[in-house]
DNA sequence: ACAGGGTTGACAATAATTAGACAATTGTTT
DNA sequence: AAACAATTGTCTAATTATTGTCAACCCTGT
């Protein structure tokens, strides 16, 4: 299999190479002109065509330049050395990203409300395509964490409120849930498994049916570099414990949204703590988590009221061990 | 199943091929004229008619062109190479040796059962990435309708059975549902709205909680060229009626999976018929739909036991106006 | 008459090419 | 500190090939 892939002398057009490497066509040609980074053959019409190896090389060069190296310095480095360079830089990469997002958030706050408003309008019209587009656009504009904190969470609150007031029809709520769920599910699915990273399980305890909050948390944890196992809503504590064990998870994150006073939930949480190994942390978020403060303290769970706290908690949990 | 054999012999008109491949009729003819991409036979009136294989080939070519390849470059590539090309089009990973990611499914001996089996194995391991990959790979190999009929439906049946027997843990069932839901939701979301096409609403009536069947149906209807509004599970009849009206739907498709004898559901169905305009068709599928035969006949609903019937029903509904 | 399909040639949008220019960094010299 | 030079990604313009779409017109069965 390995050999076959190497032997495959498929030719790739400029466009394909551009898509797969993430480099612009201009940049690729500039690198060729100025440094002979890759020297593709030409077809009868003088168009470049690249090999699989060319694409790999260019991808490595791109990653290295993204990591801060100048192209001229690394253009003659071997592939293996490049890989090492990149992986040694990668540790620093994550915190930098987050800082960028934070600073962006402060710059313009009003535009987030715009997204929420357009979403609610499109929901009124039952235009699911528009709903999807709004989320995709918001992600492009503000990044995943930005969208989660400033669009999705407010959106959920608004929908929940309208729902309780009876301003929102069930069908609208269903459509919104489906679109958001699909959006987040897709994001989560596109997250690669990172080999050495710690595992975390995200779910919702028994009789807690709201899965969207948990999904947002799952996506957040994934973007923080954890390997996430997401198990949807309404999972009994024995099941949670079993899954934690099977996946060798370092932490469990639960989302609790409604209701505020479920005695069964209190029992479930106690049971969960008993059936988990001591070194497994429990983190609890969601709008109703405040109401269970007493039990949560009792079982030593970390309560988080926003996504930022989830990120910092995960970060310290990761380094602190 | 005998559906498969039925489909194999079937001849498809230009229109159907256009809808199912997502290519315009113009483009299909241009590819034939300029590159002999597919060479359909003609009937006595010189009209092209295509086979299932033609559709698969055209779908693969479409995926490859969507991935950035020019049609002229890939038009003479074999189906197997195309599949490989498409599945390797994901952005290059950092660790280049990603051949070992997961046991790649053997393309030679792969039957549908194989996919189901791999899925159940990966589910046992709680390896959600593998689950996703299996579905994606299956779709590349057999197209959406093939996967729906021959992988997803059997999968649901097997999961349901294991579930009733208690062979399957809740957490496994949740994971499977989430992966399948995300997969189908993504497919549905990527379906473009076709301007002139009729609208259909897909959902599940009150107290019917299984949404996956409805999602499969939604995707099927979309691939049949309908504009689909999907509203998830458990929607009361007034809500269904309201949404049908707002979206100007020509038909409603309901999925009924469990339980088999819900008196409330009978009432709900009657109420739905009353609150819908007469020219709106009701189509009902799902494993438990048989149990409600009497009511369904009473309200003039079309009962469908498999996806093939759904497609034909939609087709005739569309042309028959 | 009309809808669906077919043929043909034309057209517009993409994609790719080269050569050169520009603006923002970065580093070095004065 | 200011000036200068190298670095580097992006952009423009002119040109060519590829490729999807369309208009115009014909054919056939209902």
Image (cartoon, coloured by chain):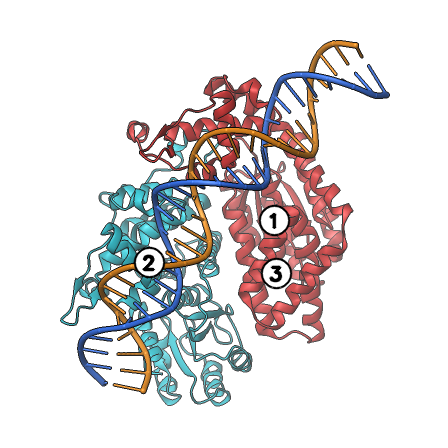
Chain colours: A red, B cyan, C orange, D blue
Tell me where residue A186 appears, x and y as whole percent. Answer: 51, 51
Q: Residues within 10 Å of mark 3 (few under 14, many from 20)?
A: many
Q: Are marks 1 and 3 in contact (CB under 8 Å)?
A: no
Name the residue rendered at 27%, 46% in the picture: B75
First along the sequence among labels 1 and 3: 1
Tell me where residue B8 appears, x and y as whole percent. Answer: 20, 62
The chain letter under disc 1 is A
Name the residue rendered at 48%, 90% in the picture: B274
Name the residue rendered at 37%, 43% in the picture: B87
Mark 1 = which residue? Answer: A140
Q: Is residue A283 left or right of residue B163?
A: right
Mark 2 = which residue? Answer: B27
Q: Residues within 10 Å of mark 1 (few under 14, many from 20)?
A: few
Q: Nearer the viewer, residue D9 or B303?
A: D9
Mark 3 = which residue? Answer: A208
Q: CA distance from mark 1 to mark 3?
A: 32 Å
Q: Nearer the viewer, residue B162 or A94?
A: A94
Pair 2/1: label in front: 2
Q: Secondary structure at mark 1?
A: helix
The chain letter under disc 3 is A
Residue A19 visible in the shown view: yes
Q: Secondary structure at mark 2?
A: helix
The chain letter under disc 2 is B
Q: Is residue C21 left or right of residue B48?
A: right
- In the image as oriented, which residue stretches furthest toward the left? B44
Question: For residue A299, which numbered disc appears in the image?
Answer: none
Tell me where residue A291 appears, x and y as whole percent. Answer: 75, 58
């Amino acid at each position: 299999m390995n050999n076959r892939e190497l032997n495959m002398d498929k030719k790739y057009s400029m466009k394909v190479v551009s898509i797969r490497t993430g480099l612009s066509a201009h940049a690729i040609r500039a690198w060729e002109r100025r440094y002979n980074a890759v020297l593709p053959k030409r077809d009868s019409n003088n168009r470049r065509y690249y090999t699989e190896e060319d694409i790999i090389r260019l991808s490595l060069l791109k990653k290295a330049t993204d990591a801060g190296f100048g192209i001229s310095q690394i253009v003659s480095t071997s592939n293996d050395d490049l890989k090492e360079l990149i992986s040694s830089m990668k540790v620093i990469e994550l915190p930098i990203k987050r800082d960028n997002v934070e600073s962006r958030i402060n710059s313009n706050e009003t535009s987030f409300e715009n997204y929420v408003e357009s979403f609610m309008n499109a929901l009124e019209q039952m235009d699911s395509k528009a709903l999807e587009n709004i989320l995709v656009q918001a992600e492009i504009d503000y990044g995943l964490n930005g969208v989660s904190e400033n669009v999705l969470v407010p959106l959920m609150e608004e929908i929940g409120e309208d729902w309780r007031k009876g301003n929102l029809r069930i069908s609208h709520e269903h459509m919104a849930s489906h679109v958001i769920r699909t959006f987040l599910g897709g994001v989560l699915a596109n997250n690669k498994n990172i080999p050495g990273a710690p595992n975390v399980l995200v779910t919702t305890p028994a009789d807690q049916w709201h899965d969207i909050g948990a999904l947002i948390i799952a996506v957040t944890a994934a973007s923080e570099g954890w390997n996430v196992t997401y198990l949807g809503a309404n999972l009994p504590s024995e099941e949670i414990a079993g899954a934690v064990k099977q996946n060798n998870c370092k932490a469990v994150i639960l989302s609790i949204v409604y209701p505020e006073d479920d005695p069964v939930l209190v029992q479930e949480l106690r049971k969960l703590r008993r059936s988990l190994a001591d070194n497994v942390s429990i983190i609890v978020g969601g709008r109703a988590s405040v109401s269970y403060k007493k039990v949560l303290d009792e079982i030593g769970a970390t309560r988080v009221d926003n996504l930022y706290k989830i990120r910092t908690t995960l970060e310290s949990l990761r380094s602190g061990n």
